[in-house]
Amino acid sequence: MSSFETRKLSPNFGVEVLGIDLSEVTGDHMFGQIRALFEEHSALLFRNQNVTDEKHQELARLFGPIEDRLADERKPGEAYEVPNVSNVRADGSTTGEMDLHTLNLKSNFLWHSDSTFLPTPALTNILIGRVVTTTGGATELASTRAAWAEMPEALKSRIRGRGIWHRYSHSRRKISPELAKLPMFNKWPDQHWEAIWRNPVNGREALYVASHAFRVDGYEEAEGEALLDELIKFCTQPEYVYSHQWSENDVLIWDQRAVLHRGTEWPTEQPRVLSSICSTATEVDGTNTIRIQ
């Protein structure tokens, strides 16, 4: 067994992991330790890693099936490609500030958990810094587990035991009505999840919300949205947030069941490329406990 060390990323959650080479991790070598850290700390940072696209996919599959939002658009025999969160065009230029692609990137500046709008949500995102900017462009994480543990009962009682509805186009409409109309944001029907996701390994609860959330059971739509805004505001107070300033070859992994995230602005003329793979949650991760039929 290889030795490794951890350092806290923030007082309430997250650790930097030192002494593990992700290129050497397999299901039989070190992944068990990584998964245990993931369950306990919700966010893991590995610096200065050499992770190819092939290894990126291998690591993601250790957590669960790879999420593939473009499966229905891919031609027969066309291979899956690792998605990039990027403002770089094929010719190397960067997208304009009001380009629809850029507006979609700006949607990621809203606090969210990935894939709450899919029929099966994401367990984790493995995000790798490929091209980073000289300023801005941070990825911020907020622990809804730590926040829920310290949330006043008066606020908890307004959401506990209720379901929340999620829709992909809802978050895009906050940025641009035109963006929200695109087919890619209207592929899936509205999803209905319990507001609290209990970790089946350690029993710790986390609030399961996102910018995609638009309605709460038992409330009028406007009242429910106001409550969602209040909950997200509480969870994203500084004491529950870690802001990651990227260096090339950083690898950031977080638990989508218990962590919100968002990007921050950067100079639009500077290229930025992060490769991102989400692993889909399974019943082992607790999907059967949050699904509302």
Image (cartoon, rainbow, N blue to C red):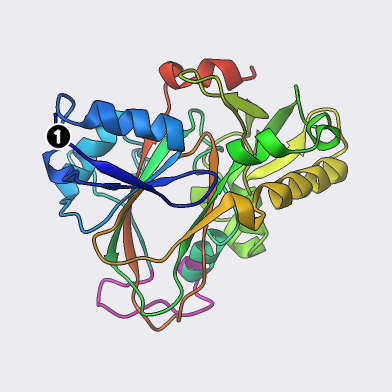
Quadrant where the N terminus is found in the figure: top left
Image coordinates for residue 57, horizontal then vertical, percent: 22, 40
Quadrant where the C terminus is found in the figure: top right
Question: With 212 as the anchor, is 113 left or right in this view?
Answer: left
Check disc 1 and report its element: helix, strand or loop: loop
Q: Amino acid at mark 1?
A: Ser
Asked whether residue 70 is drawn in magenta, I would say: no
Determine whether 116 is above or below 8 in the image. Answer: above
Question: With 226 as the anchor, is 76 left or right in this view?
Answer: left
Determine whether 32 is above or below 80 in the image. Answer: above
Image coordinates for residue 6, horizontal then vertical, percent: 33, 44
Asked whether residue 98 is drawn in magenta, I would say: yes
Which residue in the rendered view is the most extreme toward the bottom? 269
Determine whether 218 is above or below 44 in the image. Answer: above
Residue 145 visible in the displayed image: yes
Total labels drawn: 1
Q: Which residues are magenta?
A: 87-101
Tag 1 residue? 2
Question: With 40 as the anchor, is 198 left or right in this view?
Answer: right
Please identify the quarter of the rendering in which residue 212 is found: top right
Please identify the quarter of the rendering in which residue 246 is found: bottom left
Please identify the quarter of the rendering in which residue 58 is found: top left
Question: With 172 as the anchor, is 68 left or right in this view?
Answer: left
Instruction: Please report the residue visible at 57 percent of the width from the left and 25 percent of the height from the top.
Output: 204
